[in-house]
Image: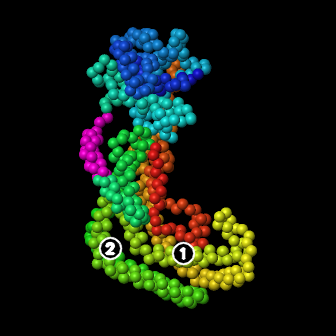
Amino acid sequence: MVLKIFFPQCCNTADSGLLVGRWIPGHTSAVVLAVVHYPFIPGQVKKYLSELQSQTQVELTVLGSWSMPKEGQEGMDSFLKDLSTIFPQKRWLQLSREIGKRGFTCQVVRNNGIHLQEQKNGDDKIILIHYDQRKVMLSQLHPVQDVGQKSDVEPSELRLVFQTVDQSQPLFFLDKYDDGPLKLTHWQSEGREASIIAELLKQASVPLCIFLTWLLSLWHWLGSFRILHLSPVLFISSKLSTCVQLGYRAVHFRNVFSPKKAATHMEFMRKANIFVSFLVDIALGLLLISWLYRENRISKLADTLVPVADRVAKELQELLEWLMGAPAGLKMNRALDQVLGRFFLYHIHLWISYIHLMSPFIERILWYVGLSACLGLTFALSVLSDIVALLTFHIYCFYVYGARLYCLKIYGLSALWRLFRGKKWNVLRQRVDSCSYDLDQLFIGTLLFTILLFLLPTTALYYLVFTLLRLVVVLFQGVIHLSVDFINSLPLFAIGLRICRPYRLAEGVKFNVICQEPGTPLHLMMEINPLKCSSVLQCYRTPTYSCNPKDSWAALCKKLFVGELIYPWKQKTDKTDKTD
């Protein structure tokens, strides 16, 4: 049998007294949490431990005695050994240390009075594991398994040790400097941590939270108007990235500034990550504003926008004129080519007229749009995505016209090809069945097949050109959406903890040998292994409205071939968020 005793480093030089801690259920291990100094009254110790048990729900008890002899305390060892009759235990630990030596001597007395001592060649071993009590208390062992969470797997011995130290925080409120009947040594015995800046921030956060809560209530009151729930308004808001991001931030505010305290570690980390991400987003937005409104960059941008739009429209006109001729020496259907070319040229003329009509107001529009960055860089990027969608709406229309016409011909040719083979598509059973056709049906089908087949190259060329243009716009908007999603989902608070205080996110522990002297137990030092950075991102990434495509590359190529719309002008509204 190997008896493991987890001993806090802060108690190595504690005065003689009683060891307070917990026996780990189901394991031959004990966790020492504090040392109660001599002198003390046993009845007060029992009363104090019973009060702590009711607060922490942890079976705290007196594990044994700790002896650190000093001048004038020659009979302290015998006195502490006799306390096992007052605090009856199945195993009574007797730890003692002499000044100038690193190792402890340890004896374990059973309730029948038999001593269990460490022997060099015996089967019974005692291992003293030293640990940093503060780091163990503040760290979270991964994978996360919160206290009280139902699980089919029994918690490990190490996890029980971490949970015991974490749940015993009320024990650390009393130290050796308090004016009371009991004086203890633990990690806070040398003084409690305090920060004036932290206290000032706590005091300032109260009115700030009240103000933000009032803003949220005002936002919900405005959102309760019936006109905002009409179908046209809901349809337009679901297509605009700005409205989606605004609703997403409103959900974040409701979670972060909720008066309900975070019950679990994951819920606390999620709130902290959202709050830090929002602060960074606002800071980046303010930097963008300072850059935009410096050196009159808004006016320069407005003066550049109209010439660029004219240049794009001119390039599209030249492209259509090239397609209406003999592009790359290909012989196209003259009549269909002229109809499609003039149809698209008319749309370009309408677009140029619209741009020149709006040109006097573009600078003022950009000036007000730039102020939206005060809500965060993600909000400004969402506005930019909507502006790109509006400025390239004619390209989207060209793509939809060409895709629908090409798709109609592809499906028509596939249906007529089944007609030649004596088959048809069964809509009810979603399969191809055999079918007999008469001569008139075959004749008409042959004529239609021939017409569609010879018109297909002209349609396919227009479809190919406008699909490539649409893909360029989609690629640019995809980069914007991925940037917004990256800022929203990046767990900045968890990354900061991993960099500044890596012990807070623990993946495991490692043991180093401290002392192995004859006549003393083996002394090990338990150190915390921090969680890997990749695991931090995977575990604490904030769920967001994902803008990644649902289709695979094979499905995407298939849609391109048959002419289906690969990226309609809409935003996904299904949320991948989940509550812990």
Q: Tell me where residue 455 sits by quadrant.
A: bottom right
Q: Is mark 2 on a helix, strand or loop?
A: helix
Q: Earlier in the sequence, mark 1 or mark 2?
A: 2
Amino acid tagged 2? Leu
Q: Residue at x 29, y 36 (%)?
A: 194
Is residue 97 among the parts visible in the rendering? no
Q: Tell me where residue 133 sits by quadrant.
A: top left
From the viewer's perspective, is 32 left or right of 124?
Answer: left
The location of residue 457, given as percent across then percent down, is 60, 82
Q: Residue 5 carries which label?
A: none
Question: Which residue bears the numbered disc 1?
Answer: 403
Observer-side mark, 1 or 2, equals 1
Depth order, front residue of 344/283 = 344
Question: Which residue bears the numbered disc 2?
Answer: 301
From the viewer's perspective, is 525 left or right of 68?
Answer: right
Whether 477 is among the magenta residues is: no
**Image height check: is 509 above or below 410?**
above
Disc 2 residue crowd, few under 14, some 14–19, many 20+, Cα 10 Å: some
Depth order, front residue of 109/111 = 111
Q: Which residue is drawn at 36% across and 53% down?
A: 250
Amino acid tagged 1? Ala
Q: Residue at x 39, y 20 (%)?
A: 50
Magenta highlight range: 193-217
**Image height check: is 141 above or below 188?**
below
Is residue 19 among the parts visible in the rendering? yes
Distance from label 1 to label 2 (Cα)? 34 Å
Q: What element carries label 1?
A: helix
From the viewer's perspective, is 437 left or right of 23?
Answer: right
The location of residue 31, given as percent across then percent down, is 46, 25
